[in-house]
Amino acid sequence: MKPVDFELHRPATTAEAVALLAEHAPEAKVLAGGQSLLPLLNFRLARPEHLVDLGRIAALAELRRTRDELVVGAMVRQARAERSPAVAADAPLLAAAFPNIAHPPIRNRGTVGGSLAHADPAAELPAVARALDAVLVAAGPAGRREIAARDFFQANLMTVLEADELLVEIRFPRAAPGTGASFQEVGRRSGDFALVGVAAQVTVRDGVVEEARVCVTGVAPTPHRAAEAEEPLTGRPLTEARLAAAADALRAAIDPSGDLHAPGEYRRDVAGTLAVRAVAQAHRRATEHAAAAA
Amino acid sequence: MGSRHEIEIVVNGEPRRCGTAARTSLADLLRDTLGLTGTHLGCEHGVCGACTVLLDGEPVRSCIVLAVQADGHAVTTIEGAGGPDGGLSPVQEAFCDAHASQCGYCTSGMVLATQALLEERPRPTRAEIDEALGGNICRCTGYVQIREAVERAAEGSGAR
Ligand SMILES: Cc1cc2nc3c(=O)[nH]c(=O)nc-3n(C[C@H](O)[C@H](O)[C@H](O)COP(=O)(O)OP(=O)(O)OC[C@H]3O[C@@H](n4cnc5c(N)ncnc54)[C@H](O)[C@@H]3O)c2cc1C
Ligand code: FES
Ligand code: FES
């Protein structure tokens, strides 16, 4: 099918985009890469009267690093971030997540900010943002505000962004030396949205897990940050018994619902299995990274 | 009422200027306004890959790109994949040789995705081929011959 008619605005600056949203909200929607929005428009599941295209705002497509942070503009395309050496070095978990998102042609258009703003409960990037305690920066008529990833996702496809607000950039803390990451998921076919996915990032020092970050996608309306799995792993060397304990703690903490693709029990079980694989691989990479840095 | 826009795009090397409604997809602009019907529409929601074209050399789904989003950019469709004399490209030859096309509905997307892959990786591994073409659905061939065609095209390009 084809979308209903709408008016398309093509602002050149963030300020213009915010003004357009303020003028036309709630009948206006932001257009980023279009890889989630345009299918919805084609099916007429969404019928916005106005679209505000962010494609011409150069400032939103910047990728830079500060002393402590990797700052990814909302309009940075997923494929570009996937190939970026800065992303691989500073946010290895983000880099590990991209190959799991759809197929390359979708990532050529889809943006980092678009995936976070869309907040699909099975998407990879919201889990990464939660795992890394990223800060999401929004711009609105009253100026800018910083939102912790913990507070950003509210429900299935719902975030705290107001109708006249725009996500402008995402700040990821730069990984410490001796950090490794892994993103593990199962789906019905490669390229599909995950049934369950686990993001893990581990930092090791002197053979001890200094920090473990684990977040699960597909098991709840918003990403599940698995503090219960991180706790038994932290401050100790990694052992199989501790990995198993972390997986059990995770399985006990979640209560995924089932659908026609997989029952909740399966998702619960597989989340634990994927957590073991993700943490083990992240740990292996962290250990290699620590050895290379030494 | 929807808005209309004047856009400039380079299509298969030729600069084009056209008016379009905001809601028109790049696929519909190519097919209906420019008459380039070699770009096929299957699902119209980004899942099948039939509508794949190259936007500044990169494969994209033209059913989920607005025509206006291509303003100022270069598009390659299957009509521009062959040689200037109208002959087949090495990738197209390889698809013929390997019997990688039956009804042909997916073929324009497959050929363009292959072309983009070989630009970036002249000698792709099986895994890289599967990753690059994994989002292109073919109802007919079972994919074995398509993979073989990509391998043949890669060998051919290596020999030159
Ligand atoms: C076949 C297919 C398979 C896919 N598989 C996956 C997958 O496995 N995993 C996955 O995570 N995703 C998947 N996607 C979705 C893809 O990653 C999208 O690119 C992404 O979800 C949205 O990003 P976008 O830039 O395309 O945003 P758009 O589609 O342009 O926008 C999506 C939504 O976010 C809003 N929005 C976008 N940017 C902003 C902003 N800066 N500020 C405020 N609001 C904003 C829009 O208004 C809209 O509501 C798939 C898509 C397709 C078509
Ligand atoms: S028609 Fe565009 S992906 Fe199917
Ligand atoms: S040749 Fe018929 S769909 Fe591929």
Image (spheres, coloured by chain):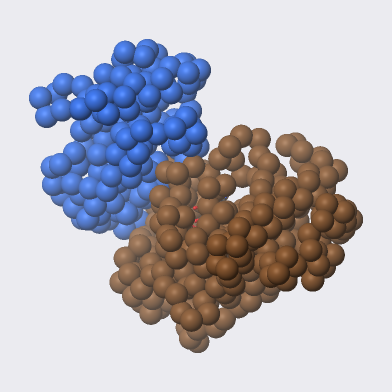
Chain colours: A brown, B blue
Query: Residue A80 or A158: which is nearer the viewer?
Result: A80
Q: Residue at x 35, y 39 (%)?
A: B121
The percent coordinates of residue B58 (x first, y second) are 33, 45
- Measured as percent of width and height from the top left, residue A228 is found at 84, 64
Expressed as whole percent of the image width and height from the top left, the position of residue A94 reads 55, 60
For the C terminus of chain A, which image quadrant? bottom right
Please state if B18 lies on the left or on the right of A183 as rendered. Answer: left
**Residue A43, above or below A279:** above
> Which residue is at a point 81% across and 67% down the rendered structure image?
A236
Residue A254: in sight, yes or no?
no
Residue A92 falls in image quadrant: bottom right
In the image, A63: left or right of B56? right
Above or below, A4 against A59 in this view is above
Front residue of B147/A140: it is B147
Please give the name of the residue rendered at 45% of the width and 65% of the height, measured from the top-left corner.
A86
* Residue placed furthest toward the front: A294
Question: Could you tell me if residue B147 is visible in this image?
Answer: yes
Which quadrant of the view contains residue A293? bottom right
- Rendered position, A104 above or below A110: above
